[in-house]
Image: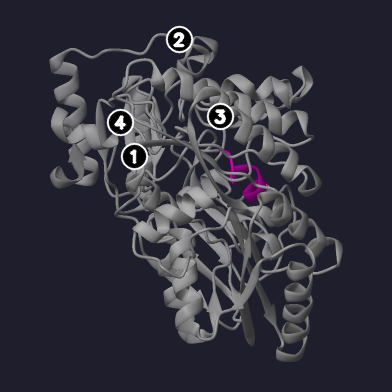
Amino acid sequence: MRIPQPDHGATLAPDLVHTPSLGPGSPAYGGAIPHPDELTRARFLSQLRGIVGAGAVVSEPAALVSYEGDGYMARSRPLAVCLPTTTGQVSDAIRLARLYGFPVTPRGAGTGLSGGATPIHGGLVIATSRMSKIREIDAENMRAIVEPGLVNIDLTRAAEPFGLYFAPDPSSQTASTIGGNVAENAGGPHCLAYGVTTNHVLGMEAVLVDGTIVSCGTMASSPDAPGYDFPGILTGSEGTLAFVTAVCVRLMPRAETVRTVLALFDTFNDAGAATSAIIQAGIIPAALEFVDGVTIGALRGGGFPEYPEGVEALLLVEVEGLSEACAEDARQVEALLAQYGAREVRVAASVAERQRLWRGRKGALGALGRLAPNYYIQDGVVPRSRLVEVLTKVQDLAKRENLLIANVFHAGDGNLHPNILYDARIPGLTERVIKAGEEILRACIDAGGTLSGEHGVGLEKAAYLDWVMSPADRATQACVKRVFDEGGWLNPGKP
């Protein structure tokens, strides 16, 4: 881990540099959080404005509402939010918060779905929305160095003239940021073939809890770096170990040919069986997505007639590569889909049609808003061979509890996303929905799966970690946390 000279945007007093840790009595371990009096609060805000500028501090109660949480239902108001533009400002803001005894919660675009950006202990939220530059695109070495606030799709757009793109493509691709993707180790439809975010991170610049600025992995053109895999540790750590201020990512070359296939099924059992058959045949599609009838209805109502009515499920399968190989894979996929019960198999006839199908798939969650004002999305993972079994349990749960559950997910890697649709204004319904979500996760674990494929643990799944981790596992992770942040100042309350 290399420690470069910091380029601070403000000069702090010497006592900000060596603030001692509070140890086990600190926020992460359940200690009391200071509630400042007005004089202390005013002094803190004044010094914070001196670091990032007066227009980059949010402190009015009405404005703070926007920073109380993410896509999860938990909410908690921070003391203040700052919007830095440089790594030095992040360093100084963290050290200032330490001086005053305030915890720090990193925040990207707020599109997370597990409560990872919810500042449950108040304190300071440091948001990355103004750190959105592309520092470098090195087309020759197929990499880029970007700041954490850069929106995911903007990186791919910038790389497009070079015939390159960034492979991780969560459904929130047009809104979520690279920093958030790194924090949650985000996936997406095309991660079946190319891997999730950690497989595309080469190096990082980050700020530690004491304000030290470090560089780990490789920020140069070398494909690897000696030493411990610190980028691998920080990716998926949900902002609990360090504040990432720049990321060196791998870019991928665009495929010569892409074929997108839409298959319609009368039963989800047939769609699940077809999913397994494709993978068992040795074909690894770029994407293999499942959309159920409830979601199809919402998409049609939202202006996507390409998604046909009258079917219980459909699969969206994409293969890509060299022309001859891609054509052969597409023929095999079409034959398998038909063999396993597809009522109809369609191939996108143009780039525009293909893009339209994917806009519908990635807009599915938004379309579900036509059916209910609220949704609670799950993120369990199961072996492909157990997909039908778990989907049956989800359907049985919906009938038993009189709940509307829509299923749209990454079938190829068994990453389920049951969406429980509900109205939070109905007394007692939210509690029933949370209980149903717990039952779905339990079904995933019982089938040999795990708690999360890409949304992270955050607040949502913290109570369920003992289902998949032994006490020794938890103790080892706690050791890593103590090495980076013994006092529990960074994103406290998240495991």
Of circles 1 and 3, the one toward us is 3
Distance between the Cα atoms at labels 4 and 1? 12 Å
**Residue matched to label 1:** 126
Q: Earlier along the polypeptide chain: callout 2 or callout 3?
A: 2
Of circles 2 and 4, the one toward us is 4
Start and end of the magenta stretch? 230-237
Seen in the image, is 271 located left or right of residue 201? right
* Picture residue at 78% right of the left edge, 20% below the top: 472
**Which of 279 and 206 lies nearest the eye of the viewer?**
279
Q: Position of residue 308 (x, y in %)?
A: 49, 65
Crowd class of label 1 (few under 14; some 14 to 19; many from 20; radius 10 Å):
many
**Residue matched to label 2:** 31
Q: Earlier along the polypeptide chain: callout 1 or callout 2?
A: 2
Q: Are marks 2 and 4 in contact (CB under 8 Å)?
A: no
Name the amino acid, label 1: Ile
Q: Which quadrant holds residue 249? A: bottom right
Name the amino acid, label 4: Glu
**Which of 435 and 426 lies nearest the eye of the viewer?**
426
Please tell me whether mark 3 sits on a helix, a strand or a loop.
Answer: helix
Kindly tell me whether residue 254 is visible in this rendering.
Answer: yes
Of circles 4 and 3, the one toward us is 3
